[in-house]
Amino acid sequence: MNNTLVIYIHGKGGNADEAEHYKKLFAGCDIAGFDYKSETPWDFKDEFLNWAEEKFCGYKSVILVANSIGAYFSMNAISQIDAENVGEQNKIIEKISRAFFISPIVNMEKLICNMMSWTRVTENQLEQKKIISTNFGENLSWEYLIYVRKNPIQWKIPTEILYGEHDNLTSFETVSEFARTHNANLSVMNGGEHWFHTDEQMKFLDGWIEEKLER
């Protein structure tokens, strides 16, 4: 067992096997992908804590690598666990020394409101119907929106962010504001997308991690 564990939290449609890609980048570290099943941030928090209690055992430090909504789920879970200030739980979270976020959802409320605007759904309509399906495959949920508003992200972990110039879910202004207010370092791939998947994009991603690890 190495002293450092790197955990990978995938985005929507991804899977824990994607963690294999990062083995060559984090030499001397153990790698673990979190194969979560949760679809809401409140369910993810409990699932993540149960997983972390076992997985983090024996390691001195943990590096978090998270993609898209996986980054939001992770930030929310860690923020809530930290706020609850339960001794044993906090000891687990305190092991996370650094984070690498790829195309993170950093403002879920804004994203939900944008999706409401795209589908011309008002807050009153969503409150009345509770759940409204969209033509782009996402369900709008009143419960989800209220949860996000009641549980703002409080993020303190040193973080590196990789953002694609043509990200269609998060604007540059939104990710820049998050980086500024949370002392995160923001890197932008010109011509990049929300989903980093082409050979060129993955090469850029790998180079980004390697550069940051050298510092």
Image: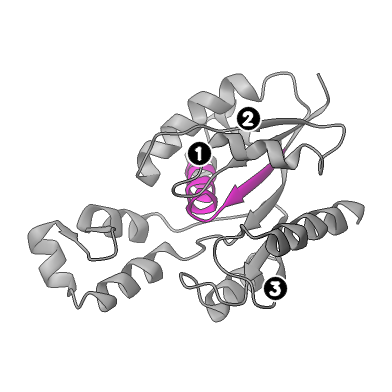
Q: Mark 1 near mark 2, Cβ–Cβ under 8 Å?
A: yes
Residue 81: numbered disc: 1
Q: In the rendered view, does 196 fall on the left or right side of 63?
A: left
Residue at point 44%, 47% (across, down): 13
Q: Position of residue 150 (x, y in %)?
A: 34, 57
Which residue is tagged 3?
A: 188
Q: Kindly give the residue lying farthest to the left in the view shown.
A: 128
Residue at point 19%, 78% (across, down): 120
Q: Position of residue 104 (x, y in %)?
A: 56, 60
The segment highlighted magenta reads: 63-81
What number of labels is visible? 3
Q: Mark 3 near mark 1, Cβ–Cβ under 8 Å?
A: no
Q: Judge the density around disc 3: few (<14), some (14-19), many (≥20) Cα neighbours within 10 Å.
A: some
- The chief SS type of the magenta part is helix
Residue at point 39%, 71% (across, down): 110
Q: Position of residue 132 (x, y in %)?
A: 16, 60
Q: Secondary structure at mark 3?
A: strand
Please name the amino acid that badge 1 sits on: Ile
Quadrant of the image for the N terminus? top right
Q: Earlier in the sequence, mark 1 or mark 2?
A: 1
Q: In the rendered view, does 127 fall on the left or right side of 138?
A: left
Q: In the rendered view, does 130 fall on the left or right side of 77?
A: left
Quadrant of the image for the C terminus? bottom right
Q: Secondary structure at mark 2?
A: helix
Please name the amino acid that badge 3 sits on: Val
Q: Secondary structure at mark 1?
A: helix
Q: CA distance from mark 3 to mark 1?
A: 30 Å
**181 to 159, vertically: above or below:** below
In this view, the residue in front, 25 or 99, is: 25
